[in-house]
Image: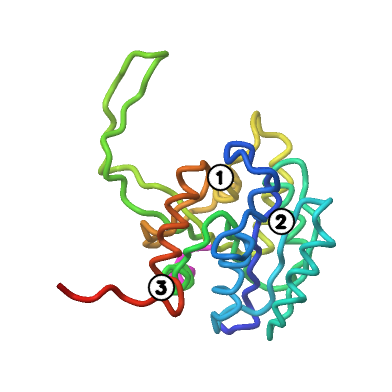
């Protein structure tokens, strides 16, 4: 797959109500930068990625463009407004691309690794849609109210992450069916499955977690501080 055939869409249009911040989640600061910038820089540095599209809250589009322009990146980055639901925001980003493949990534996953991106790209040799995922390690139960129910077989369950990679043409066709679903899809892979496409799985990374709550943000801040460029390593004892 050559570089020009893949565009990356950073989804940064969510409100992040569960985080309780005063600004949309993608603009919460981590290591002195808005959250969405961390994954953006990782994808900009990847040789397989051509152009990038950031999907921002409509009211934040001008500010997002100023932030991106201030980074002085060597690849083209387009900023487009999001929609009411996630799938509508992603569709806006996909429509702004002309690539054969589109890679979708949540801005709330700032620690995406190059190896995860590579794995998704490799899996596209066999599938028209690929998701990054990690095995489930906790015990998973159904529940009703405050009563525990059936324990599920965790060996058959994975935790889905992003990036997710799609043939752009097939994803655009799948968006046509989204409005007919009983509830908004939680990711684009559901739309491809609904259209009959097989979705491949690639190895994700436990550190590629999604920041949703204040606890997640505190964990991300601790991880960033540990990885911070120029940080002095503690002496060996």
Mark 3 and mark 1: span between their CA atoms? 24 Å
Q: Disc 3 or 1, which lies upstream in sequence? A: 3
Judging depth in this view, the residue of 204 and 234 nearest the camera is 234
Mark 1 Cα within 10 Å, few/some/many (few <14, many 20+)?
A: some
Q: Marks 3 and 2: which is nearer the front? A: 3
Judging depth in this view, the residue of 72 and 140 nearest the camera is 72
Judging depth in this view, the residue of 200 and 112 nearest the camera is 112
Q: Residue at x 69, y 48 (%)?
A: 24
Relative image position of residue 120 (x, y in whole percent): 46, 67
Mark 3 Cα within 10 Å, few/some/many (few <14, many 20+)?
A: few
Q: Disc 2 or 1, which lies upstream in sequence? A: 2
What secondary structure is the magenta-colored segment mainly? loop
Q: Which residue does the numbered mark 1 point to in the structure image?
A: 190
Q: Are marks 3 and 1 in contact (CB under 8 Å)?
A: no
Task: Give SS at disc 1.
Answer: helix
* Residue 172 circle label: 2
Mark 2 and mark 1: span between their CA atoms? 13 Å
Q: Disc 3 or 2, which lies upstream in sequence? A: 3
Q: Residue at x 37, y 62 (%)?
A: 203
Mark 3 and mark 2: span between their CA atoms? 27 Å
Side of 63 where 155 appears, left or right: left
Mark 2 Cα within 10 Å, few/some/many (few <14, many 20+)?
A: some
Relative image position of residue 222 (x, y in whole percent): 41, 58
Q: Quadrant of the N terminus?
A: bottom right
Q: Are marks 2 and 1 in contact (CB under 8 Å)?
A: no
Q: Which residue does the numbered mark 3 point to in the structure image?
A: 115
Q: Quadrant of the C terminus?
A: bottom left
Query: For the magenta stretch, what is the residue range?
Result: 123-128
In the displayed image of the protein, which residue is found farthest to the left?
237
User: Is residue 9 in the magenta section?
Assistant: no
């Amino acid at each position: 797959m050559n570089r020009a055939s893949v565009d990356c869409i950073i989804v940064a249009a969510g409100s992040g109500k569960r985080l309780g911040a005063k600004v949309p989640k993608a603009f919460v600061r981590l290591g002195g930068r808005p959250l969405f910038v961390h994954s953006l820089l990782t994808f900009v540095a990847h040789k397989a990625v051509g152009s990038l599209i950031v999907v921002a809250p409509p009211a934040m589009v001008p500010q997002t463009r100023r932030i991106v322009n201030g980074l002085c990146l060597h690849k083209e980055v387009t900023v487009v407004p999001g929609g009411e639901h996630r799938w509508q925001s992603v569709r806006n980003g996909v429509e702004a691309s002309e690539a054969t493949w589109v890679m979708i990534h949540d801005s709330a996953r700032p620690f995406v690794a190059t190896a995860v991106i590579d794995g998704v790209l490799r899996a596209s040799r066999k599938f028209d849609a690929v998701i990054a995922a990690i095995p489930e390690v906790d015990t998973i139960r159904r529940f009703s109210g405050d009563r525990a129910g059936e324990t599920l077989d965790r060996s058959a369950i994975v935790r889905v992450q992003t990036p997710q990679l799609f043939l752009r043409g097939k994803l655009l066709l799948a968006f046509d069916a989204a409005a007919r679903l009983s509830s908004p899809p939680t990711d684009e892979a559901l739309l491809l499955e609904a259209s009959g496409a097989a979705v491949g799985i690639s190895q994700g990374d436990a550190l590629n977690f999604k920041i949703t709550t204040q606890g997640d943000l505190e964990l991300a801040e601790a991880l960033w501080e540990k990885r911070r460029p120029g940080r002095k390593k503690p002496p060996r004892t």
